[in-house]
Amino acid sequence: MGKDPVTGAIPLWSYVAFASFHGPTFLYTKVQRMRDKTNGIAAADEVESGWWVGGRYASELGRRWAGTIDLTCEFPETSTQDRYLLLRCWDGVPPTPDQLETAAQFGVSARLAGSDVLVHCAHGRGRSTTTMCACLVKAGLYTTWEAAFDAIKKRRSCVKLNK
């Protein structure tokens, strides 16, 4: 898709070459975001102090993040952050163990260096939740991924884990 690993931008050529992919994908995600708003699901939720999990529309919150972990291949990054990590994962596909370790180390480092960290995928349900579990365990806030998942689910009821 040509997504820039430094900025999260998707080049114009990608939109032209893959218009039949980008168009329906953007439309579906926009409709899902409207449904989420109707159902009271925020663009992102703070699951522990300074740790936020959400979807690609987290920029709606108008925050500047100390670090953003972006788990999408298919969308440009729209949030503002001091540090950015792109881990290319397709919707429905969990991050690899190596990607989870990279994300957890990045998240802990960004959290220590600044304020809030955002972990997001397209909708803020699967990829981002899996990654947030790794971050919270790495940060020492929970001893197991199960405990981290339970804590996340209390703050963002729509989450699930990709297996």
Image: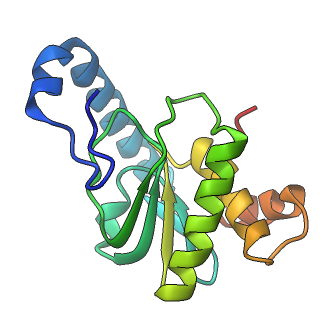
Q: Is residue 129 above or below residue 17?
A: below
Q: Nearer the viewer, residue 153 or 4?
A: 4
Q: Position of residue 129 (x, y in %)?
A: 65, 51
Residue 21 is at least partly visible in this image: yes
Q: Position of residue 153 (x, y in %)?
A: 73, 58
Q: Nearer the viewer, residue 18 or 113?
A: 113
Q: Is residue 20 above or below residue 149?
A: above
Q: Quadrant of the C terminus?
A: top right
Q: Quadrant of residue 25?
A: top left
Residue 159 is at least partly visible in this image: no
Q: Is residue 90 left or right of residue 5?
A: right
Q: Nearer the viewer, residue 138 or 145?
A: 138
Q: Quadrant of residue 73?
A: top left
Q: Position of residue 37 (x, y in %)?
A: 41, 52
The coloring applied to the image is rainbow
Q: Quadrant of the N terminus?
A: top left
Q: Is residue 149 left or right of residue 69?
A: right
Residue occupying the point 44% across, 71% down: 67
Q: Residue furthest top?
A: 20
Residue occupying the point 61% across, 29% down: 93
Q: Position of residue 112 (x, y in %)?
A: 57, 86
Q: Is residue 106 above or below residue 74?
A: below
Q: Quadrant of residue 68?
A: bottom left
Residue occupying the point 84% across, 72% down: 142
Residue occupying the point 25% across, 55% down: 7
Q: Is residue 121 above or below residue 101?
A: above
